[in-house]
Image (spheres, coloured by chain):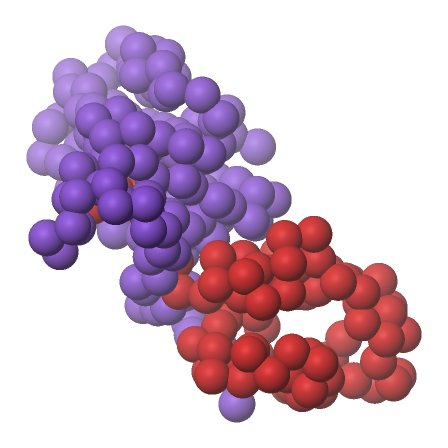
């Protein structure tokens, strides 16, 4: 099990994510923070609540980090996702990538977020300023991978 | 046989957040569980086609055979990460 895939219930320690991947052979460390935005389609958002199917979410995060690392020699990837209430402006996800060279780090960081959004069973619930609450359901789980049908 | 069903996001609005136990005939498959659940919870019907299903944490299709004691998760389209 990789300690570099984590689900946390408190603010994400960005420096710890950086330390988890930094290595003497790496000339690049790239940090991506996905933060909670204060609006969605014209509605003011005050808070997001993230909910996960934890055992599967952790397993899939570990698979993503391992597969990205296997693609490129020397590449190291950490993905930390926060669960529970996340206020506007704070990070819901941090992706840290260390690589011998920067190009591979940019590519892996982008891929890590795209795979996370399609493959990891995590959902967000938006709390609007007017008191309304709604689940956001966006990407069919597993889309872009070997999709199983329920039919 | 008995299986445990856990549900998330809008599916948990229908089934509850604590999960439910469902008793099924031997030899039942995921689609049979779906039929049993939809009979008990009609609000699942319009949702079912959008759900992914995992058995013990791995995505499966409707023909996947179920076994005693497995955990079946109903997984609506996901929205992890951020808006970025």
- Whether residue B56 is situated above or below residue B33 in the rendered picture: above
- Whether residue A84 is situated above or below residue A22 in the rendered picture: below
- Quarter of image, res A65: top left
- Quarter of image, res A11: top left
**Which quadrant of the rendered structure holds the N terminus of chain B?**
bottom right
User: Which residue is at 17% across, 37% downward?
Assistant: A38
Colour seen for chain B:
red
Residue B2 location (% of width, % of height): 86, 69
Residue B29 location (% of width, % of height): 72, 83
- Whether residue A139 is situated above or below residue A107 in the rendered picture: below
- B40 left or right of A15 in image: right
How many callouts does the rendering have? 0
> Which residue is at the front of the view, A64 or A13?
A13
Residue B66 location (% of width, % of height): 76, 75
Please indicate, yes or no, whether residue A41 appears anywhere in the rendered image. yes
- A113 left or right of B25 in image: left
User: Which residue is at 75% across, 63% downward?
Assistant: B20
> Which residue is at the front of the view, A48 or B48?
A48
**Which quadrant of the rendered structure holds the C terminus of chain B?**
top left
- Quarter of image, res B36: bottom right
Q: Which chain is purple?
A: A
- A105 left or right of B45 in image: left
């Amino acid at each position: 099990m990789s300690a570099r895939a984590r689900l946390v219930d408190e603010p994400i320690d960005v420096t710890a994510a950086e330390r988890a991947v930094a290595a003497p052979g790496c000339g690049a460390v790239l940090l991506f923070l996905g933060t909670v935005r204060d609006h969605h389609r014209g509605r003011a958002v005050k808070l997001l609540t993230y909910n996960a199917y934890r055992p599967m979410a952790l397993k899939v995060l570990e698979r993503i980090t391992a597969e990205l690392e296997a693609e490129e020699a020397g590449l190291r990837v950490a993905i930390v996702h926060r669960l529970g209430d996340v206020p506007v402006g704070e990070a819901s996800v941090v992706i840290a990538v260390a690589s011998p060279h920067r190009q591979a780090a940019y590519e892996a960081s982008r891929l890590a977020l795209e795979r996370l959004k399609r493959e990891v069973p995590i959902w967000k619930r938006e709390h609007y300023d007017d008191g309304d609450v709604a689940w956001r359901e966006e990407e069919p789980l597993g889309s872009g991978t070997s999709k199983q049908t329920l039919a | 046989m008995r299986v445990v069903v856990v549900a998330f996001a809008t599916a948990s609005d229908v089934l509850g957040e604590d999960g439910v136990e469902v008793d099924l005939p031997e030899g039942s498959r995921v689609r049979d569980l779906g039929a049993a659940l939809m009979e008990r919870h009609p609000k699942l019907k319009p949702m079912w086609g959008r759900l992914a299903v995992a058995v013990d944490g791995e995505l499966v299709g409707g023909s996947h055979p179920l076994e005693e004691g497995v955990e079946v998760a109903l997984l609506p389209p996901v929205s992890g990460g951020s808006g970025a």
